[in-house]
Amino acid sequence: MTAVADVAATVPERQYTHHEGRGATPHRSNPVVIHREIANLDVREDMNVIEYGTGSGYSGALLAEIVGNGGHVTSLDIDAYLARWAGLIHQERGLHNIHCHVADGTAGFPKPAPYDRMVSWCTPPFLPKAWVDQVVDGGLIVAPLPIAPVPNMTVVAKIRVVGGEPVVEEVFTGGYIEATTSPKDNLDLPGRWVDWENRVPSPSWISVAWRDHDDHWNTGAHTALDLLTKDAHTEPYAGPEIDWPSWRTFAAAQADPNLTMAGLRPDLWAIGHSTPATAAVLQQDGTVLASRADSPSLTILRNWLTAWEDAGRPAPETYSSTLTRTSEGWNLRLTQ
């Protein structure tokens, strides 16, 4: 058994996720994935650790047990309700080396920095400079990061800080809810980069990488969504069942300025290509929707899918990672 598995055996998960005083919290991650991220974080006794996204409090409890009495865990969440309840449960269990705070984690948390380890359970829009600045030299960050400027296209990155600069050591399949500046109640809608949303006759939304070229009224995004929801051309994908993590990573790696993510039905994402006059996407269920049968976007989407199949449906872990510096931090992009 790994150290994380040993510790997990001593932490009562349901006391955090289904506490009798608070009830179940929807703001929680799969325990198996939590264990994976903490294992990759390589947390040890006596370390100073920070986590972004308190959630139910379960992940913080695992970290607090690992660092022991000589270590310390700082836990941040934008939602005061979650942070306060997690703090209470920690107190009930006699954990005194973890403190929960209500804060926007994307801005970092200077005190008690610097941190030996940093983990995020929510996805910032980029790797913030404040995070890198607040980690010791040689320290590790494990965080989900976008690989394209649309929602739900992420990988989890293991990043080493060397001489004040972040270096990606590995990437893994996965992602978490987008970090937002206020508590998020609607978990069905992405937290950012939604360029148009319809609520009637049924919920739908679209995110376009070309938003900076749209007008002030988001006319292009509005039109593209209409093209996919009103009398759209529909056809089944001819290939095998969609490997969604592979497909979305491949689509993001194309770095196409017309990349598009949409939610045309509840709990069903779609990825493709769009402009203000044409659109085509592949849904998770294998359905292709397009503005028309001869849509230029449909031709591009078909070419992407052919290239993806020819490449052997590569796993996200097989891509090369590049961090590009911006004024506020770093953008992560993947290439084959």
Image: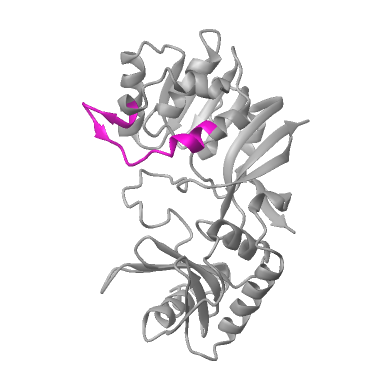
**Quarter holding the N terminus?**
top right
Residue at horizontal 45 percent and vertical 25 percent from the top: 60
- In the image, taking residue 23 as reference, residue 135 lies left or right, namely right
Work out whether 279 lies above or below 332: below
Image quarter of residue 37: top right
Most foreground residue, 142 or 110: 142
- Mark yes or no: residue 84 visible: no
**Quarter holding the C terminus?**
bottom right
Most foreground residue, 118 or 284: 284
Residue at horizontal 35 percent and vertical 26 percent from the top: 86
Residue at horizontal 55 percent and vertical 50 percent from the top: 125
Image quarter of residue 144: top right
Instruction: Look at the image and say whether residue 58 sits in the magenta stretch.
Output: no
Residue 250: percent from left, percent from top: 64, 62
Residue 308: percent from left, percent from top: 66, 68
Farthest residue, direction bottom:
294
Residue 263: percent from left, percent from top: 41, 66
Instruction: Look at the image and say whether residue 25 sits in the magenta stretch.
Output: yes
Work out whether 97 lies above or below 183: above
Residue 248: percent from left, percent from top: 57, 61
Work out whether 230 lies above or below 2: below
The span picked out in magenta is 16-35
Image quarter of residue 245: bottom right
Residue at horizontal 37 percent and vertical 86 percent from the top: 231
